[in-house]
Amino acid sequence: MNITDNIQDFIPQRPPFVHLDKLRFCNEEETISSFEIKAEHIMVKNGQLTAGGLVENIAQTAAAGTGYLSSEAGEEVKRGYIGAVKNLTVNKLPEVGTQIYTRIYSTNQVLNVNIIKGEVHDNDGYLYAQCEMKIFLEE
């Protein structure tokens, strides 16, 4: 089930720098997105999404979740900025044509800082990448 196919309502990025296609699930603790990797994507190199693309996918999934929840509450969608990436592990770079699913767990929020854990999997559950991230939200 998709919450929305119009992901750009919830993130500030615009093509060609969008790193997710659909918001599939979202609540206060967890957000799930999907993204089909296409050959023409700006962060594809040698037929694979780059590690930077995976990190941006995690960040944009977090942004989409925050934006969706803000929208549902009747609030303005806020911009967020990556403040820190910690414990990044990239097991393998996903290839063009792969559908990835990114799961964000919100672990803590203090004032305007959201601390999340992100994981990127494929449909079979293979873990491509994971990290922790501090995201600063605009006031």
Image (tube, rainbow, N blue to C red):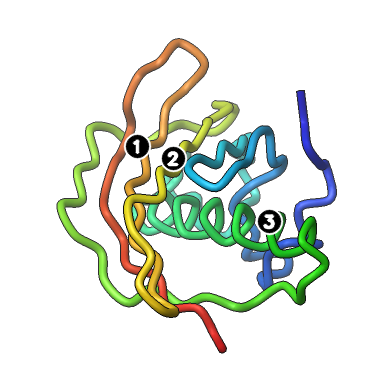
Q: Residue furthest bottom?
A: 139
Residue at screen point 35% across, 72% down: 110
Spatial separation of the CA atoms under disc 2 and disc 3: 31 Å
Label 2 with label 3: CB-CB less than 8 Å: no
Q: Tell whether 124 sits left or right of 76.
A: left
Spatial separation of the CA atoms under disc 1 and disc 2: 6 Å
Is disc 2 placed on a helix, strand or loop? Answer: strand
For marks 3 and 1, the one nearer the N-term is: 3
Q: What's the residue type where badge 3 is placed?
A: Leu
Badge nearest the viewer, 1 or 2: 1
Q: Locate residue 36, reporting x and y percent.
A: 63, 34
For marks 1 and 2, the one nearer the N-term is: 2
Is disc 1 placed on a helix, strand or loop? Answer: loop
Q: Locate residue 53, reporting x and y percent.
A: 44, 54
Q: Nearer the viewer, residue 29 or 10?
A: 29
The residue indicated by pointer 3 is 69
For marks 2 and 3, the one nearer the N-term is: 2
Label 1 with label 2: CB-CB less than 8 Å: yes
Badge nearest the viewer, 2 or 3: 3
The residue indicated by pointer 1 is 93
The residue indicated by pointer 2 is 48
Q: Nearer the viewer, residue 28 or 26?
A: 28
Residue at screen point 50% across, 40% down: 30
Quadrant assignment, res 25: top right
Quadrant for the N terminus, please.
Answer: top right
Spatial separation of the CA atoms under disc 3 and disc 1: 30 Å
Q: What's the residue type where badge 1 is placed?
A: Leu
Q: What's the residue type where badge 2 is placed?
A: Gln
Q: Tell whether 138 sits left or right of 21.
A: left
Is disc 3 placed on a helix, strand or loop? Answer: helix
Quadrant assignment, res 55: bottom left
